[in-house]
Image (cartoon, rainbow, N blue to C red):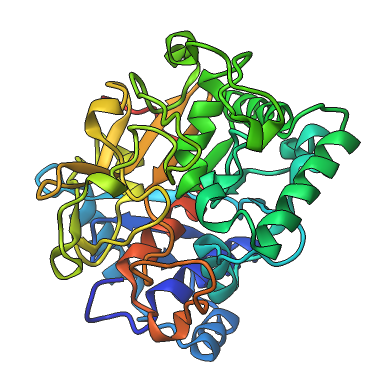
Amino acid sequence: MDADGQADHLKAYGITYYSLEKQLEVRWLLNYRGGSFLISDTEDLRRECQIRGVSFEVISDQKTEQILEEISSPSRNMETVELEKAPKIAVYTPEGNKPWDDAVTMALEYAEIPYETIYDREVLNDALILYDWLHLHHEDFTGQYGKFYRAFKTTPWYIKDKEEAEALAAELGYDKVSEEKLAVALKIRDYVVGGGFMFAMCSATDSFDIALSAEGVDIAEPMFDGDPSEPGYQSKIDYSNTFAFTDFILERSPMVYEFSSIDMTQKRQISAESDYFTLMDFSAKWDVVPTMLTQNHTRLVKGFMGQTTAYNPENVKANVLVMGESKLNGEARYIHGIKGKGFFTFYGGHDPEDYTHRVGDPKTELELHPTSPGYRLILNNVLFPAARKKKQKT
């Protein structure tokens, strides 16, 4: 999985998932040649690698022992993690096509990793217990329809989405979309607290935390929910309810395409050519989880934007780990934390291979980006629940 040795890093994750489905022995060699996978050899596996265009090497038992001995040396920042089972994956997404693409769905399909889609009805009916891993993408859990009002309020897709969201909320027994979305957010919170793995990108990250912090508080203006927001609602925000963020200031104006001070999109002063973020280095033997989540063939990842592009470090809770940051722009891009018995990872931006993905833009063709470092971070999270858990030492 290093830069020169692998022709298709993304499909390699699919091969690893395939191997877990076939109940082959799989080990993730953290920090060894870009985070390579050691898999028991079969003719079927070799053939599958060839069909999918994934580079592999067949090594002897003696060579295997040499590699594992090298990794186990206290002087090497490497570790071996056993992967036990293929996690069952759920992608939270509404039925039908949206005017945006979902980077995780594209990654899963390109890597040939199976998943199922669920939405509010299934979440509220406790379907999350069926899954090991949940993905949230371009979603607004505050009931403000993505704060698209100013630019898109008269477009057919915005009107249609708003009508469908209101109809679904009513069908599920809620007076407002904001109340229904809060109920969904609370179910997702309980899923994570109970031991689930949640991965979120773009606006699903900050809008999720904002919804939790505003439980019981009306922060939506009349064009969103039919009545005025609650006077002085900023002072009623409860940061103790959130996963990752604290001390943020909500954006009151419905005409501003922004939720709060968490997002750095409007504060950025950086050109596309110099927009990169750096993955942090962790001790593989002591901090196994963040080491897994930052496996890559480069530590420098090309930046990309979204409705929520990156996070203001001042609004990131002290117990949340920053795994990727842009020091040039003073922002956190990739963060991870523990909630109850479960884990969450928030990844800023919309599509790692589409710098300014906008409404109506064509979908990204991952065949053109088979070695994408930005997409590798997504797939690290997909395999994370498969790992045999070791108690984190720091």
Query: Left or right: where does residue 148 sit relative to residue 281?
Result: right
Place of residue 369 in the rendered image (x, y in percent of width and height, measured from the top left) = 38, 80
Q: Is residue 342 visible?
A: no
Place of residue 365 in the rendered image (x, y in percent of width and height, measured from the top left) = 48, 82
Rendered residue at 51%/36% (across/down): 207
Instruction: Name the quarter where the N terminus is drawn.
Output: bottom left
Rendered residue at 67%/53% (across/down): 93
Splitting the image into 4 quarters, where does residue 197 fall?
top right
User: Residue 129 versus residue 324: which sits nearer the camera?
Assistant: 324
User: Residue 387 versus residue 129: which sits nearer the camera?
Assistant: 129
Query: Left or right: where does residue 366 sit relative to residue 266?
Result: right
Vertical relation: 270 (above or below) 57: above
Q: Can residue 29 be seen in this view?
A: yes
Vertical relation: 281 (above or below) 380: above
Instruction: Name the quarter where the C terminus is drawn.
Output: top left
User: Residue 166 versus residue 350: which sits nearer the camera?
Assistant: 166
Place of residue 98 in the rendered image (x, y in percent of width and height, measured from the top left) = 65, 64
Rendered residue at 73%/35% (across/down): 129
How many numbered markers are drawn? 0
Place of residue 352 in the rendered image (x, y in percent of width and height, measured from the top left) = 37, 65
Vertical relation: 95 (above or below) 254: below
Query: Left or right: where does residue 223 sit relative to residue 279?
Result: right
Query: Left or right: where does residue 329 sit relative to residue 214?
Result: left
